[in-house]
Image (spheres, grey):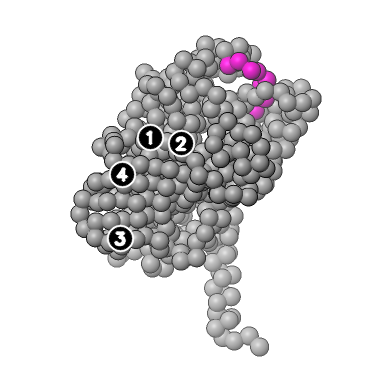
Amino acid sequence: MVTEKQERYFSDWKKREEIAELMLPIIGRLYRDRGVVITIYDRKLVHQSTIDILRAHRFARQILENELSVRDTMPVLEAVAKLELAPARIDIGKLTVRFQAQAGNLDIDAFVRQELKDVNTGSKPLLTEPRDVVLYGFGRIGRLLARILIDQTGGGEKLRLRAAVVRKGSEDDLMKRASLLRRDSIHGPYNGTIKVDKEENAIIANGNLIHIIYSDDPATVDYAKYGISNAILIDNTGKWRDREGLGKHLKSGGISQVILTAPGKGDVPNIVYGVNNELLTADEQIFSAASCTTNAIVPVLKVINDRFSIVEGHVETCHSYTNDQNLIDNYHKKSRRGRGAPLNMVITETGAAKAVAKALPELSGKLTGNAIRVPTPNVSLAILSLNLGQETSVEEVNRVLRDASLEGPLHEQIDYTNSPDAVSSDFVGSGYACVVDSCATIVQGKRCNLYVWYDNENGYSCQVVKMVDYLAGLKLPVLPK
Protein backbone atom coordinates (compact mmCIF):
# COMPACT_ATOMS: atom_id res chain seq x y z
CA MET A 1 0.00 0.00 0.00
CA VAL A 2 1.39 3.39 -1.00
CA THR A 3 1.52 5.81 1.90
CA GLU A 4 0.76 9.49 1.65
CA LYS A 5 4.43 10.36 2.23
CA GLN A 6 5.59 7.94 -0.49
CA GLU A 7 3.17 9.46 -2.95
CA ARG A 8 4.26 12.98 -1.99
CA TYR A 9 7.95 12.20 -2.52
CA PHE A 10 7.32 10.51 -5.87
CA SER A 11 4.99 13.24 -7.13
CA ASP A 12 7.60 15.83 -6.19
CA TRP A 13 10.28 13.88 -8.07
CA LYS A 14 8.17 13.60 -11.22
CA LYS A 15 7.47 17.34 -11.19
CA ARG A 16 11.15 18.25 -10.72
CA GLU A 17 12.12 15.81 -13.47
CA GLU A 18 9.57 17.42 -15.81
CA ILE A 19 10.96 20.91 -15.08
CA ALA A 20 14.54 19.73 -15.65
CA GLU A 21 13.50 18.27 -19.01
CA LEU A 22 12.08 21.66 -20.01
CA MET A 23 15.37 23.30 -19.08
CA LEU A 24 17.42 21.23 -21.54
CA PRO A 25 16.38 22.89 -24.83
CA ILE A 26 16.73 26.39 -23.32
CA ILE A 27 20.25 25.61 -22.08
CA GLY A 28 21.15 24.11 -25.47
CA ARG A 29 19.89 27.09 -27.49
CA LEU A 30 21.68 29.60 -25.28
CA TYR A 31 24.92 27.69 -25.79
CA ARG A 32 24.72 27.04 -29.54
CA ASP A 33 23.16 30.34 -30.62
CA ARG A 34 24.73 32.81 -28.20
CA GLY A 35 27.76 31.14 -26.67
CA VAL A 36 26.21 31.33 -23.18
CA VAL A 37 27.26 28.59 -20.74
CA ILE A 38 24.71 27.97 -17.99
CA THR A 39 25.99 26.70 -14.63
CA ILE A 40 24.82 26.04 -11.10
CA TYR A 41 27.55 26.92 -8.64
CA ASP A 42 30.13 26.26 -11.36
CA ARG A 43 28.57 22.92 -12.41
CA LYS A 44 28.09 23.17 -16.19
CA LEU A 45 24.59 22.28 -17.37
CA VAL A 46 25.51 22.28 -21.06
CA HIS A 47 25.41 18.78 -22.62
CA GLN A 48 24.02 17.33 -19.39
CA SER A 49 21.07 15.03 -18.84
CA THR A 50 17.91 15.62 -16.83
CA ILE A 51 19.38 13.67 -13.93
CA ASP A 52 22.64 15.64 -14.14
CA ILE A 53 20.68 18.88 -13.76
CA LEU A 54 18.89 17.57 -10.69
CA ARG A 55 22.18 16.36 -9.21
CA ALA A 56 23.72 19.81 -9.73
CA HIS A 57 20.87 21.31 -7.72
CA ARG A 58 21.41 18.71 -5.01
CA PHE A 59 25.12 19.53 -4.84
CA ALA A 60 24.35 23.24 -4.44
CA ARG A 61 21.94 22.44 -1.62
CA GLN A 62 24.59 20.48 0.26
CA ILE A 63 27.14 23.29 0.04
CA LEU A 64 24.70 26.16 0.64
CA GLU A 65 22.95 24.29 3.45
CA ASN A 66 19.54 25.37 2.19
CA GLU A 67 17.16 24.21 -0.52
CA LEU A 68 17.75 25.01 -4.19
CA SER A 69 15.15 23.55 -6.50
CA VAL A 70 14.52 23.56 -10.25
CA ARG A 71 11.22 25.18 -9.33
CA ASP A 72 13.24 28.22 -8.27
CA THR A 73 15.90 28.21 -11.00
CA MET A 74 13.59 27.58 -13.99
CA PRO A 75 11.98 31.07 -13.88
CA VAL A 76 15.47 32.57 -13.66
CA LEU A 77 16.61 30.55 -16.68
CA GLU A 78 13.54 31.66 -18.64
CA ALA A 79 14.30 35.29 -17.77
CA VAL A 80 17.89 34.81 -18.94
CA ALA A 81 16.68 33.39 -22.26
CA LYS A 82 14.63 36.54 -22.96
CA LEU A 83 17.75 38.72 -23.12
CA GLU A 84 20.00 39.42 -26.11
CA LEU A 85 23.17 38.16 -24.46
CA ALA A 86 26.79 38.20 -25.57
CA PRO A 87 28.86 35.09 -24.77
CA ALA A 88 29.16 34.59 -21.00
CA ARG A 89 29.17 32.03 -18.22
CA ILE A 90 26.00 32.55 -16.19
CA ASP A 91 25.34 30.87 -12.86
CA ILE A 92 21.58 30.50 -12.41
CA GLY A 93 22.14 29.04 -8.94
CA LYS A 94 23.78 32.21 -7.67
CA LEU A 95 21.24 34.36 -9.52
CA THR A 96 18.39 32.46 -7.84
CA VAL A 97 19.84 32.84 -4.34
CA ARG A 98 20.37 36.58 -4.90
CA PHE A 99 16.86 36.99 -6.29
CA GLN A 100 15.38 35.31 -3.24
CA ALA A 101 17.50 37.50 -0.93
CA GLN A 102 16.19 40.74 -2.47
CA ALA A 103 12.72 39.75 -1.24
CA GLY A 104 10.57 41.04 -4.07
CA ASN A 105 12.07 44.50 -4.58
CA LEU A 106 12.26 43.69 -8.31
CA ASP A 107 10.29 41.22 -10.38
CA ILE A 108 12.33 38.35 -11.80
CA ASP A 109 12.73 39.79 -15.32
CA ALA A 110 13.90 43.17 -14.02
CA PHE A 111 16.25 41.55 -11.51
CA VAL A 112 17.91 39.29 -14.10
CA ARG A 113 18.16 42.15 -16.57
CA GLN A 114 19.92 44.27 -13.94
CA GLU A 115 22.33 41.50 -12.90
CA LEU A 116 23.28 40.69 -16.51
CA LYS A 117 23.35 44.22 -17.92
CA ASP A 118 27.08 43.95 -18.71
CA VAL A 119 26.45 41.18 -21.25
CA ASN A 120 22.94 42.14 -22.39
CA THR A 121 24.54 43.79 -25.40
CA GLY A 122 23.47 41.58 -28.26
CA SER A 123 24.75 38.23 -29.47
CA LYS A 124 28.22 38.43 -30.95
CA PRO A 125 31.13 35.98 -31.09
CA LEU A 126 34.24 36.62 -28.99
CA LEU A 127 36.48 35.75 -31.96
CA THR A 128 36.22 37.01 -35.53
CA GLU A 129 37.14 33.51 -36.71
CA PRO A 130 37.72 30.16 -34.94
CA ARG A 131 41.17 29.57 -33.46
CA ASP A 132 42.95 26.39 -34.52
CA VAL A 133 44.25 23.94 -31.90
CA VAL A 134 46.69 21.07 -32.48
CA LEU A 135 47.49 18.22 -30.09
CA TYR A 136 51.03 16.89 -30.25
CA GLY A 137 50.55 13.43 -28.75
CA PHE A 138 47.30 11.52 -28.27
CA GLY A 139 47.78 9.60 -25.03
CA ARG A 140 45.89 9.85 -21.74
CA ILE A 141 46.00 13.65 -21.52
CA GLY A 142 45.78 14.19 -25.27
CA ARG A 143 42.53 12.25 -25.63
CA LEU A 144 40.95 13.94 -22.61
CA LEU A 145 41.93 17.32 -24.05
CA ALA A 146 40.26 16.26 -27.29
CA ARG A 147 37.05 15.35 -25.47
CA ILE A 148 36.95 18.69 -23.62
CA LEU A 149 37.79 20.79 -26.67
CA ILE A 150 35.14 19.06 -28.79
CA ASP A 151 32.59 19.42 -26.00
CA GLN A 152 33.01 23.20 -25.92
CA THR A 153 32.96 23.75 -29.69
CA GLY A 154 29.53 25.33 -29.33
CA GLY A 155 28.29 26.94 -32.52
CA GLY A 156 31.75 26.51 -34.06
CA GLU A 157 32.95 30.09 -33.67
CA LYS A 158 35.41 29.35 -30.86
CA LEU A 159 38.25 26.83 -30.76
CA ARG A 160 38.56 24.17 -33.46
CA LEU A 161 40.59 21.04 -32.75
CA ARG A 162 42.18 20.53 -36.15
CA ALA A 163 44.76 17.77 -35.74
CA ALA A 164 46.62 15.35 -33.50
CA VAL A 165 50.25 14.54 -34.33
CA VAL A 166 51.42 11.03 -33.44
CA ARG A 167 53.92 8.36 -34.42
CA LYS A 168 52.27 5.75 -36.63
CA GLY A 169 51.90 2.53 -34.75
CA SER A 170 50.38 0.12 -37.28
CA GLU A 171 48.44 -0.10 -40.51
CA ASP A 172 45.15 0.20 -38.61
CA ASP A 173 46.48 3.11 -36.55
CA LEU A 174 43.56 5.44 -37.39
CA MET A 175 40.95 2.92 -36.25
CA LYS A 176 42.82 2.27 -33.02
CA ARG A 177 43.12 6.01 -32.28
CA ALA A 178 39.39 6.45 -32.87
CA SER A 179 38.58 3.48 -30.67
CA LEU A 180 40.70 4.82 -27.80
CA LEU A 181 38.92 8.17 -28.05
CA ARG A 182 35.53 6.42 -28.12
CA ARG A 183 36.16 4.12 -25.13
CA ASP A 184 37.99 4.80 -21.89
CA SER A 185 38.31 2.36 -19.00
CA ILE A 186 38.39 5.17 -16.43
CA HIS A 187 36.30 8.00 -17.84
CA GLY A 188 33.76 5.88 -19.69
CA PRO A 189 32.47 6.08 -23.25
CA TYR A 190 32.73 9.30 -25.22
CA ASN A 191 29.56 11.37 -24.97
CA GLY A 192 29.01 11.84 -28.67
CA THR A 193 29.52 10.27 -32.09
CA ILE A 194 32.83 9.20 -33.60
CA LYS A 195 33.62 7.90 -37.07
CA VAL A 196 36.69 7.87 -39.30
CA ASP A 197 37.41 9.39 -42.71
CA LYS A 198 40.14 7.20 -44.22
CA GLU A 199 40.61 9.46 -47.22
CA GLU A 200 41.49 12.38 -44.93
CA ASN A 201 43.10 10.09 -42.32
CA ALA A 202 40.88 11.84 -39.82
CA ILE A 203 38.59 11.21 -36.89
CA ILE A 204 35.16 12.89 -37.07
CA ALA A 205 33.95 13.60 -33.52
CA ASN A 206 30.60 15.39 -33.18
CA GLY A 207 31.16 16.87 -36.63
CA ASN A 208 34.73 18.03 -35.88
CA LEU A 209 37.21 16.78 -38.49
CA ILE A 210 40.48 16.01 -36.68
CA HIS A 211 43.40 15.02 -38.91
CA ILE A 212 45.74 12.36 -37.55
CA ILE A 213 49.19 13.45 -38.72
CA TYR A 214 52.13 11.05 -38.54
CA SER A 215 55.51 12.54 -37.66
CA ASP A 216 58.55 11.95 -35.44
CA ASP A 217 59.89 15.49 -35.78
CA PRO A 218 57.75 18.56 -35.00
CA ALA A 219 59.84 20.78 -37.27
CA THR A 220 58.88 18.78 -40.36
CA VAL A 221 55.08 18.86 -40.05
CA ASP A 222 53.47 20.79 -42.90
CA TYR A 223 50.46 22.29 -41.16
CA ALA A 224 49.63 24.48 -44.16
CA LYS A 225 48.77 21.27 -46.04
CA TYR A 226 45.85 20.87 -43.65
CA GLY A 227 44.82 24.53 -43.70
CA ILE A 228 46.06 25.04 -40.14
CA SER A 229 47.36 28.49 -39.24
CA ASN A 230 47.98 30.61 -36.14
CA ALA A 231 47.34 27.49 -34.06
CA ILE A 232 47.87 26.87 -30.37
CA LEU A 233 49.72 23.56 -30.04
CA ILE A 234 49.49 21.48 -26.86
CA ASP A 235 52.49 19.19 -26.44
CA ASN A 236 51.38 16.36 -24.16
CA THR A 237 54.28 14.02 -24.91
CA GLY A 238 56.68 15.53 -22.36
CA LYS A 239 59.55 14.72 -24.72
CA TRP A 240 60.76 18.34 -24.82
CA ARG A 241 60.52 20.54 -21.74
CA ASP A 242 62.86 23.45 -22.42
CA ARG A 243 62.56 26.43 -24.74
CA GLU A 244 64.91 24.98 -27.36
CA GLY A 245 63.06 21.68 -27.65
CA LEU A 246 59.56 23.14 -27.57
CA GLY A 247 60.64 25.82 -30.04
CA LYS A 248 60.82 23.13 -32.72
CA HIS A 249 57.04 23.31 -32.99
CA LEU A 250 57.26 26.94 -34.07
CA LYS A 251 59.63 26.23 -36.96
CA SER A 252 57.21 24.29 -39.14
CA GLY A 253 54.80 27.18 -39.69
CA GLY A 254 51.15 27.20 -38.71
CA ILE A 255 51.89 27.18 -34.97
CA SER A 256 51.99 30.46 -33.08
CA GLN A 257 52.02 29.33 -29.42
CA VAL A 258 52.94 26.15 -27.54
CA ILE A 259 51.67 24.79 -24.23
CA LEU A 260 53.54 21.96 -22.50
CA THR A 261 51.52 19.63 -20.26
CA ALA A 262 54.40 19.04 -17.85
CA PRO A 263 56.68 21.23 -15.73
CA GLY A 264 58.84 23.41 -17.96
CA LYS A 265 62.57 23.81 -17.55
CA GLY A 266 64.78 26.89 -17.72
CA ASP A 267 62.95 30.13 -18.43
CA VAL A 268 59.72 28.52 -19.68
CA PRO A 269 56.87 30.18 -17.73
CA ASN A 270 55.10 27.62 -15.49
CA ILE A 271 51.43 28.56 -15.23
CA VAL A 272 48.87 27.41 -12.69
CA TYR A 273 45.78 28.81 -14.33
CA GLY A 274 43.87 31.13 -12.02
CA VAL A 275 46.93 31.94 -9.89
CA ASN A 276 49.64 33.49 -12.07
CA ASN A 277 47.82 34.31 -15.29
CA GLU A 278 49.83 37.51 -15.59
CA LEU A 279 52.54 35.38 -17.22
CA LEU A 280 50.20 34.55 -20.12
CA THR A 281 51.31 37.45 -22.29
CA ALA A 282 50.94 37.98 -26.02
CA ASP A 283 54.69 38.39 -26.54
CA GLU A 284 55.47 34.92 -25.13
CA GLN A 285 55.13 31.88 -27.39
CA ILE A 286 55.98 28.96 -25.10
CA PHE A 287 54.29 28.08 -21.81
CA SER A 288 54.12 25.19 -19.35
CA ALA A 289 50.92 24.16 -17.60
CA ALA A 290 53.06 22.77 -14.72
CA SER A 291 52.02 19.37 -13.29
CA CYS A 292 48.69 17.97 -12.15
CA THR A 293 49.86 18.01 -8.52
CA THR A 294 51.14 21.58 -8.72
CA ASN A 295 47.78 22.65 -10.17
CA ALA A 296 45.99 20.83 -7.35
CA ILE A 297 47.91 22.27 -4.40
CA VAL A 298 48.77 25.84 -5.46
CA PRO A 299 45.19 27.23 -5.40
CA VAL A 300 44.58 25.89 -1.87
CA LEU A 301 48.00 27.03 -0.67
CA LYS A 302 47.33 30.53 -2.00
CA VAL A 303 43.99 30.80 -0.20
CA ILE A 304 45.48 29.54 3.07
CA ASN A 305 48.60 31.69 2.80
CA ASP A 306 46.59 34.82 1.99
CA ARG A 307 44.38 34.30 5.05
CA PHE A 308 46.61 32.67 7.67
CA SER A 309 50.21 32.93 6.33
CA ILE A 310 52.16 29.69 5.86
CA VAL A 311 55.40 29.52 7.85
CA GLU A 312 56.48 26.10 6.55
CA GLY A 313 55.00 22.81 5.49
CA HIS A 314 55.25 19.43 3.81
CA VAL A 315 53.27 18.09 0.84
CA GLU A 316 52.75 14.34 0.54
CA THR A 317 50.89 13.06 -2.49
CA CYS A 318 49.22 9.68 -2.83
CA HIS A 319 49.31 9.60 -6.61
CA SER A 320 47.68 7.07 -8.92
CA TYR A 321 50.08 4.99 -10.96
CA THR A 322 50.96 6.16 -14.47
CA ASN A 323 52.26 4.70 -17.74
CA ASP A 324 55.79 5.49 -16.60
CA GLN A 325 55.62 2.55 -14.17
CA ASN A 326 55.68 -1.16 -14.93
CA LEU A 327 52.57 -3.34 -14.67
CA ILE A 328 54.68 -6.17 -13.26
CA ASP A 329 58.21 -6.16 -11.89
CA ASN A 330 60.76 -5.31 -14.56
CA TYR A 331 63.77 -3.09 -15.13
CA HIS A 332 63.23 0.67 -14.75
CA LYS A 333 65.90 3.35 -14.76
CA LYS A 334 64.39 4.97 -11.66
CA SER A 335 64.38 3.45 -8.19
CA ARG A 336 61.25 1.49 -7.15
CA ARG A 337 59.25 2.38 -10.30
CA GLY A 338 60.17 -0.97 -11.80
CA ARG A 339 57.97 -2.76 -9.25
CA GLY A 340 54.43 -3.70 -10.29
CA ALA A 341 52.29 -0.55 -10.16
CA PRO A 342 48.88 -2.24 -9.57
CA LEU A 343 50.33 -4.33 -6.72
CA ASN A 344 52.36 -1.90 -4.62
CA MET A 345 52.55 1.46 -2.94
CA VAL A 346 55.72 2.95 -4.38
CA ILE A 347 57.66 5.74 -2.71
CA THR A 348 58.98 8.19 -5.29
CA GLU A 349 59.82 11.83 -5.67
CA THR A 350 57.75 14.82 -6.78
CA GLY A 351 58.88 18.26 -7.79
CA ALA A 352 55.49 19.78 -6.99
CA ALA A 353 56.57 21.36 -3.68
CA LYS A 354 59.50 23.16 -5.31
CA ALA A 355 57.35 24.06 -8.31
CA VAL A 356 54.95 25.93 -6.01
CA ALA A 357 57.51 28.74 -5.77
CA LYS A 358 57.23 29.41 -9.52
CA ALA A 359 53.54 30.26 -9.10
CA LEU A 360 53.72 31.57 -5.52
CA PRO A 361 57.19 33.10 -4.97
CA GLU A 362 56.20 34.04 -1.41
CA LEU A 363 56.34 30.32 -0.50
CA SER A 364 59.84 29.78 -1.91
CA GLY A 365 61.88 27.52 0.37
CA LYS A 366 58.99 26.94 2.78
CA LEU A 367 57.75 23.57 1.51
CA THR A 368 59.12 20.04 1.16
CA GLY A 369 57.42 17.26 -0.75
CA ASN A 370 57.36 13.60 -1.60
CA ALA A 371 55.04 11.16 -3.35
CA ILE A 372 53.66 7.65 -3.00
CA ARG A 373 52.35 6.00 -6.14
CA VAL A 374 49.35 3.90 -5.14
CA PRO A 375 47.54 1.05 -6.96
CA THR A 376 44.62 3.06 -8.34
CA PRO A 377 44.43 4.15 -12.00
CA ASN A 378 43.17 7.72 -11.44
CA VAL A 379 42.43 10.37 -8.78
CA SER A 380 45.16 11.37 -6.39
CA LEU A 381 45.28 12.86 -2.90
CA ALA A 382 47.55 15.65 -1.66
CA ILE A 383 48.08 15.95 2.08
CA LEU A 384 49.19 19.45 3.06
CA SER A 385 50.80 19.55 6.53
CA LEU A 386 51.23 23.23 7.30
CA ASN A 387 52.48 25.42 10.13
CA LEU A 388 50.56 28.68 10.02
CA GLY A 389 51.37 32.17 11.21
CA GLN A 390 48.35 32.27 13.52
CA GLU A 391 46.11 29.94 15.48
CA THR A 392 42.85 28.94 13.91
CA SER A 393 40.21 26.18 13.98
CA VAL A 394 38.77 23.48 11.73
CA GLU A 395 35.60 25.52 11.32
CA GLU A 396 37.43 28.68 10.27
CA VAL A 397 39.75 26.92 7.81
CA ASN A 398 36.85 25.06 6.23
CA ARG A 399 34.78 28.24 6.01
CA VAL A 400 37.60 30.07 4.22
CA LEU A 401 38.05 27.23 1.72
CA ARG A 402 34.30 26.78 1.23
CA ASP A 403 33.89 30.49 0.49
CA ALA A 404 36.83 30.34 -1.93
CA SER A 405 35.12 27.50 -3.80
CA LEU A 406 31.86 29.41 -4.11
CA GLU A 407 32.70 33.05 -4.69
CA GLY A 408 36.45 33.71 -4.67
CA PRO A 409 38.76 34.33 -7.66
CA LEU A 410 39.76 30.65 -7.56
CA HIS A 411 36.23 29.24 -7.59
CA GLU A 412 36.89 27.60 -10.97
CA GLN A 413 39.91 25.77 -9.53
CA ILE A 414 38.77 24.80 -6.01
CA ASP A 415 35.86 22.46 -5.32
CA TYR A 416 34.65 21.48 -1.85
CA THR A 417 32.99 18.44 -0.35
CA ASN A 418 31.47 17.84 3.06
CA SER A 419 30.62 14.19 2.48
CA PRO A 420 31.82 11.92 5.32
CA ASP A 421 31.90 8.92 2.95
CA ALA A 422 33.86 10.44 0.05
CA VAL A 423 36.57 8.24 -1.50
CA SER A 424 38.83 8.59 -4.52
CA SER A 425 36.48 7.08 -7.12
CA ASP A 426 33.88 9.74 -6.30
CA PHE A 427 36.10 12.34 -7.98
CA VAL A 428 36.70 10.60 -11.30
CA GLY A 429 35.73 13.12 -13.94
CA SER A 430 36.02 16.17 -11.69
CA GLY A 431 36.76 19.24 -13.78
CA TYR A 432 38.35 21.14 -10.91
CA ALA A 433 42.06 21.42 -10.18
CA CYS A 434 41.33 20.16 -6.65
CA VAL A 435 38.56 19.20 -4.23
CA VAL A 436 38.95 20.09 -0.55
CA ASP A 437 37.79 17.26 1.72
CA SER A 438 36.42 19.32 4.61
CA CYS A 439 35.58 16.29 6.75
CA ALA A 440 39.28 15.35 6.89
CA THR A 441 40.62 18.79 7.90
CA ILE A 442 42.69 18.73 11.09
CA VAL A 443 43.69 21.87 13.00
CA GLN A 444 45.53 22.17 16.30
CA GLY A 445 46.57 25.69 17.17
CA LYS A 446 48.85 26.81 14.34
CA ARG A 447 49.17 23.33 12.84
CA CYS A 448 46.88 22.44 9.96
CA ASN A 449 46.46 19.30 7.84
CA LEU A 450 44.42 19.54 4.65
CA TYR A 451 43.35 16.67 2.39
CA VAL A 452 42.90 17.63 -1.25
CA TRP A 453 41.60 15.24 -3.92
CA TYR A 454 42.25 15.75 -7.62
CA ASP A 455 41.48 13.91 -10.83
CA ASN A 456 45.05 13.96 -12.06
CA GLU A 457 43.85 13.39 -15.63
CA ASN A 458 40.59 15.25 -16.23
CA GLY A 459 40.98 18.02 -13.65
CA TYR A 460 44.41 18.83 -14.99
CA SER A 461 43.21 18.71 -18.61
CA CYS A 462 40.47 21.22 -17.76
CA GLN A 463 43.13 23.55 -16.38
CA VAL A 464 45.08 23.24 -19.63
CA VAL A 465 42.00 24.06 -21.72
CA LYS A 466 41.37 27.13 -19.56
CA MET A 467 44.87 28.28 -20.53
CA VAL A 468 44.07 27.72 -24.20
CA ASP A 469 40.83 29.69 -23.87
CA TYR A 470 42.69 32.55 -22.22
CA LEU A 471 45.40 32.69 -24.89
CA ALA A 472 42.75 32.60 -27.63
CA GLY A 473 40.79 35.46 -26.07
CA LEU A 474 37.92 33.22 -25.00
CA LYS A 475 37.82 34.13 -21.34
CA LEU A 476 34.08 34.35 -20.76
CA PRO A 477 32.77 36.93 -18.29
CA VAL A 478 31.34 35.13 -15.26
CA LEU A 479 28.03 36.42 -13.92
CA PRO A 480 26.61 37.35 -11.51
CA LYS A 481 29.65 39.18 -10.19
Q: Where is residue 28 in the image (x, y as percent from the top left)?
A: 55, 47
Q: Is residue 474 placed above or below 243 in the rendered structure?
A: below
Question: Quick check: marks 1 and 2 in contact, CB under 8 Å?
Answer: yes
- Label 4, residues with CA under 10 Å away: few <14, some 14-19, many ≥20: many
Report, in whole angstroms, how far the alpha carbon at label 4 lies from the one at label 2. 17 Å
Residue 373 is a magenta residue: no
Segment colored magenta: 210-218
Mark 1: secondary structure: helix
Question: Quick check: marks 3 and 4 in contact, CB under 8 Å?
Answer: no
Q: Nearer the viewer, residue 129 or 416?
A: 416
Dot 1 or dot 2: first in sequence order is: 2
Which residue is tagged 1?
355
- Label 3, residues with CA under 10 Å away: few <14, some 14-19, many ≥20: many
Horizontal side of 367 relative to 446 (left or right) equals right
Camera-side mark, 3 or 2: 3
Question: Quick check: marks 1 and 4 in contact, CB under 8 Å?
Answer: no
Q: Is residue 344 visible?
A: yes
**Residue positioned 56% across, 55% down in the render:** 425
Mark 3: secondary structure: strand
Residue 302's disc number = 4
Report, in whole angstroms, how far the alpha carbon at label 1 lies from the one at label 2. 9 Å
Q: Position of residue 281 (x, y in %)?
A: 35, 24
Mark 2: secondary structure: loop
Quadrant in which residue 199 is drawn: top right
Dot 4 or dot 2: first in sequence order is: 2
**Residue positioned 46% across, 64% down in the render:** 419
Report, in whole angstroms, how far the alpha carbon at label 3 lies from the one at label 4. 18 Å
